[in-house]
Image (cartoon, grey):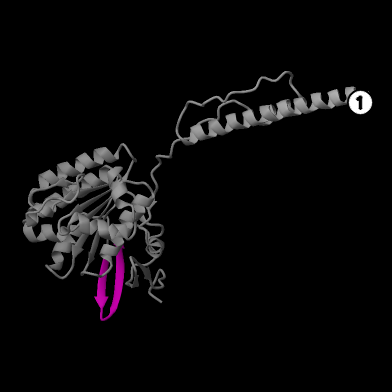
Amino acid sequence: MIDDQKERLLRELRQTAQDLMNAIASAQEKLNEIQALLNGSNTVQQPVRVAPSSTSPLQSSIHRRLPSAPIPSPSPPSREKPEKLRTGIEKLDDLLSGGIRLSSNVLLVGPPYSGKDTLAWNFVGQSLREKIPVAVITTDKSINDLKMEISKIYPDVNAAEASGYIRFIDVYSKSIQSQTQSQYAVTIDTVINVSSLLKAMDTIVSQFANIAPYYRLVFTSLTTYVSEIDEKVLMKFVQQFAQKRKSDGGTSLYLIESGLFDKKVIEALSYHMDGSITFRTDASKLFLRVEGLGSVRSRDWVEVFPSENTFELGAFTLEKIR
């Protein structure tokens, strides 16, 4: 009698052990499926399974809860175009009622250290954070200098460049008889070679099209072109360049220094833009004002409070600064 009882208990223990081994094997199979999906692989490695002598209730329950059918792959990222793009500066986006409208050309006007460069690099950093490609045209700074500024906003700028999310067009290095500082950059020999700049930008845009349906651009700066190109040639170039960017999905910022030439030049450039953000200094204070760019919360001068790598804005209403 005692021997029969022992034999029954041993059979139950063996069955329980078998059920547990099957449960572990099923769980391992599911883990392999999940790991394969995370690694982007379509091949699921099948584990070695211990064949059960019979199907127990515990085994059937586990298999119902851990099916071996493959899990559908996640949907690809949306390629829908947003109505507006964030600038990377929260209070400015609030002033702009959500950001800069997609496919806009925006002139950033102001003296040195007034905030326009800070806005430009936050605009680039925001693009890289959102995995949206961005082009930077430089006529007055080295690529290494620009990378240093951008890295304060987005530290992995070199990795972003290697993966194709940021591209530089270098119109600066040749002017100082130096080599470009990026193996990925397109080098333009001289400022007056505007046809090469147009072609280079078209090539980069075609590359960006493989990544996203739209892109961003920072042009720093138009001041060099105003100084070195005949005004009629300049206006024709800006008109053509801006129209191309608008048609191919680019949202572009064009930097220009104020106080170096007649205000009529800036007015003429503004004619080819969708709006402008102008910075000015008044004693020890900074202000900005938005013109154009659709619906914004204030058209008055709003005080700017610079901080490290960004800035805040003073209070504003639809009528005036508080």
105, above or below 214, in the image: below
Residue 90 vs 79, above or below: the answer is below
Give the amino acid type for the residue marked by disc 1 in the picture.
Ile
User: Which residue is label 1 attached to?
Assistant: 2
Of residue 2 and residue 133, the one placed in the foreground of this image is 2
For residue 95, which quarter of the picture? bottom left
Q: Is residue 15 magenta?
A: no
Residue 281 in the magenta stretch? The answer is yes
Q: Return the residue nearer the eye: 314 or 147.
A: 147
Residue 292 seen in this snapshot: no
Residue 301 drawn at (x, y percent): 32, 72
The residue that appears at 12% across and 59% down in the rendered structure is 224
Q: Which residues are magenta?
A: 278-292
In the rendered image, the quadrant that contains the C terminus is bottom left
Across and down, in percent, residue 196 comes to 11, 44
Give the image location of residue 268, x and y in percent.
Answer: 16, 59
146 relative to 135, above or below: below
Q: Is residue 188 left or right of residue 78?
A: left
Residue 12, horizontal then vertical, whole percent? 80, 26
